[in-house]
């Protein structure tokens, strides 16, 4: 069931019963688009780094900002950085804001020699490590040349060292490699790694450490062939502490898929991934489907939960927690207005969706959540891009700070629907829950360990009425490996109240049949 939580500017709700605070706060500075791409906090304050655009000498130019607020979203200080002493460099953050001490934070980004947003080709980009104190003062800006056109998209810190991930190429984009550098806290390079074959590889997904100081990096690889058709797959790389690439595995479908985000589960024995894949679960669903999955340490899937819907969903950041739960934030479309809403979803350790929420400050504007942190009270602080009406009546985008309670709600009780405690079913191919259901149910498919996978075939879930007429179907679900559990949403669509039969097929083989009820 979808719930839209709409709050006016500066909404504040006190959740005294459970000691939690929630608010929606917008920060306005730029005449055109500002968004907070990364957020973190200490025991007193919340910190946001972001990107915006401002007019400079008549041109629309990118710039950067740093915001410090209290736990209620009230700004303590703000630093806006338009350009450095060179005068023609414009920088942007990508993602990640990490503490390296009680008073110093670091984040990744890049500098561009473009004079405006409407740049000429073949201009130089340099990857950058930014270091700030907690007042927002820049204490270090370290540039990295790479092959001449370098952007860092991710950052992760481990035991006094920092790893920056992105891509590097020359200025003609002849040979694009995934690019990782490990540096000490003052930016001195310890080692660097190039990933891929130079066709196109990018470390654009989340990164994490996989024990023994070994790095796990997610990204995308472009398999452009001689016919010049570009097909993307996600890819996961493992890199040792000397910068040696010792493992790579592609993840995707026969379609054109996105990068992979990857995090190490808290038990250290599995990985949590997300990807946006080119397939259609149901003819009424959006053609690109977001999933969250768990793999073993050889990147074989244990389960995948597809967040299929009629409308678009996309996840930017996910995190794992000690109880095995997974929380992710991003963007979703919720209705035919097609205005993006901020999106947050929580799953348990078995991949069951516990709740999902969408939030907007102004239904007529674009809203995105790019990053989040779990707060000491169990709630979540999220940064992104929001929108509101400005003087003159126009809708403008601006930096958005959203604080939610532990159920993902901005307003207490935004969704009172109870969540069933469903474990992975390892005894049968197929289950549906709840059953009976009204608007939607979860279909769970469990593949046995000896399941024979043919890479050209997908699973098909056909729905029949009791007269044997085909009513609906869900298809293009490609198994990754034996033993995997796959979940997706089944919607009521054209079905009326009554009994139905569902058949699970793989190619021409019928795997299982189950009966369910619409009430």
Image (cartoon, rainbow, N blue to C red):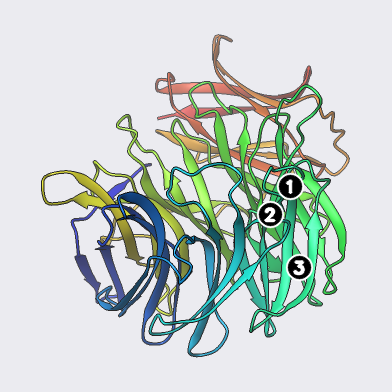
**Label at residue 85:** none
Work out whether mark 3 precedes mark 1 in sequence or the reverse, and give the earlier one: 1
The residue under the point 71% across, 77% down is 183
Q: In terms of depth relative to the viewer, which is nearer, 508 or 372?
A: 372
Question: Disc 2, disc 1: CB below 8 Å?
Answer: yes
Residue at image location 44% in from the left, 64% down from the top: 87
Query: What is the C-alpha distance between the residues marked 2 and 1?
Result: 7 Å
What residue is disc 3 on?
215
Instruction: Decide if residue 265 is in sight here.
Output: no
The one nearer the camera, 445 or 134, is 134
Near mark 3 (Cα within 10 A), the count class, few <14, some 14-19 or many ≥20, is: many
Disc number lying in front (3 or 1): 1
Query: Residue at the spot x=33%, y=60% of the render?
Result: 399
Quadrant assignment, res 108? bottom right
91, above or below 303, in the image: below
Examine the rendered structure and indicate whether residue 379 appears above or below residue 336: below
Say whether residue 298 is left or right of residue 305. Answer: right
């Amino acid at each position: 069931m979808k719930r839209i939580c709409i709050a006016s500017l500066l909404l504040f709700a006190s959740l005294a019963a459970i000691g939690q605070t929630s608010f929606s706060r917008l920060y306005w500075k730029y005449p055109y688009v500002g968004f907070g791409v990364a957020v973190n906090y200490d025991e007193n304050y919340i910190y946001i780094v972001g990107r915006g655009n401002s007019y400079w000498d008549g041109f629309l130019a990118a710039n950067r900002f740093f915001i410090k607020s209290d736990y209620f979203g009230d700004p303590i200080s703000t630093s806006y950085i338009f350009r450095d002493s060179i005068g023609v460099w414009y920088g942007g953050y990508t993602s990640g804001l990490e503490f390296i001490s009680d008073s110093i934070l670091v984040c990744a980004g890049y500098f561009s020699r473009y004079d405006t947003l409407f740049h000429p080709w073949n201009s130089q980009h340099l990857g950058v490590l930014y270091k700030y104190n907690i007042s927002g003062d820049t204490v270090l800006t370290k540039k990295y040349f790479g092959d001449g056109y370098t952007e860092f998209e991710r950052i992760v810190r481990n035991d006094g060292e920092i790893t920056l991930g992105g891509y590097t190429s020359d200025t003609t984009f002849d040979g694009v490699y995934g690019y990782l550098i490990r540096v000490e806290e003052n930016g001195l390079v310890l080692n660097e790694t190039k990933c891929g074959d130079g066709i196109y590889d990018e470390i654009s997904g989340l990164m994490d450490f996989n024990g023994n100081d070994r790095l796990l990096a997610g990204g995308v690889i472009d398999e452009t062939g001689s016919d010049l058709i570009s097909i993307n797959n996600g890819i996961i790389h493992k890199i040792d502490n000397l910068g040696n690439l010792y493992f790579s595995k592609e993840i995707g479908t026969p379609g054109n898929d996105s990068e992979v985000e990857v995090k190490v589960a808290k038990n250290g024995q599995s990985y949590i991934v997300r990807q946006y894949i080119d397939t259609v679960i149901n003819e009424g669903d959006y053609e690109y489907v977001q999933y969250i999955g768990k793999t073993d340490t050889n990147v074989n899937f244990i389960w995948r939960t597809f967040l299929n819907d009629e409308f678009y969903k996309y996840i930017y950041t996910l995190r794992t927690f000690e109880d095995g739960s997974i929380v992710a934030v991003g963007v979703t479309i919720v209705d035919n207005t097609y205005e993006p809403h901020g999106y947050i979803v929580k799953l348990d350790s078995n991949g069951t969706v516990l709740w999902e929420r969408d939030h907007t400050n102004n239904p007529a504007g674009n809203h995105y959540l790019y990053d989040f942190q779990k707060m000491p009270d169990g709630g979540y602080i999220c940064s992104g891009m929001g929108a509101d009406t400005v003087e003159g009546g126009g809708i403008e985008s601006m930096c958005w700070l959203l604080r939610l309670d532990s159920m993902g709600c901005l307003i207490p009780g935004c969704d009172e629907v109870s969540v069933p405690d469903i474990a992975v079913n390892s005894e049968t191919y197929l289950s549906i829950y709840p059953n009976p259901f009204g608007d939607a149910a979860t279909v769970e498919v469990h593949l046995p360990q000896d399941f024979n996978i043919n890479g050209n075939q997908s699973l098909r879930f056909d729905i029949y009425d009791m007269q044997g007429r085909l009513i609906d179907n869900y298809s293009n679900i490609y198994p990754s490996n034996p033993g995997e559990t796959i979940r997706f949403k089944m919607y009521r669509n054209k079905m009326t109240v009554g009994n139905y039969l569902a058949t699970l097929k793989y190619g021409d083989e019928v795997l299982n049949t189950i009966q369910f009820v619409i009430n």
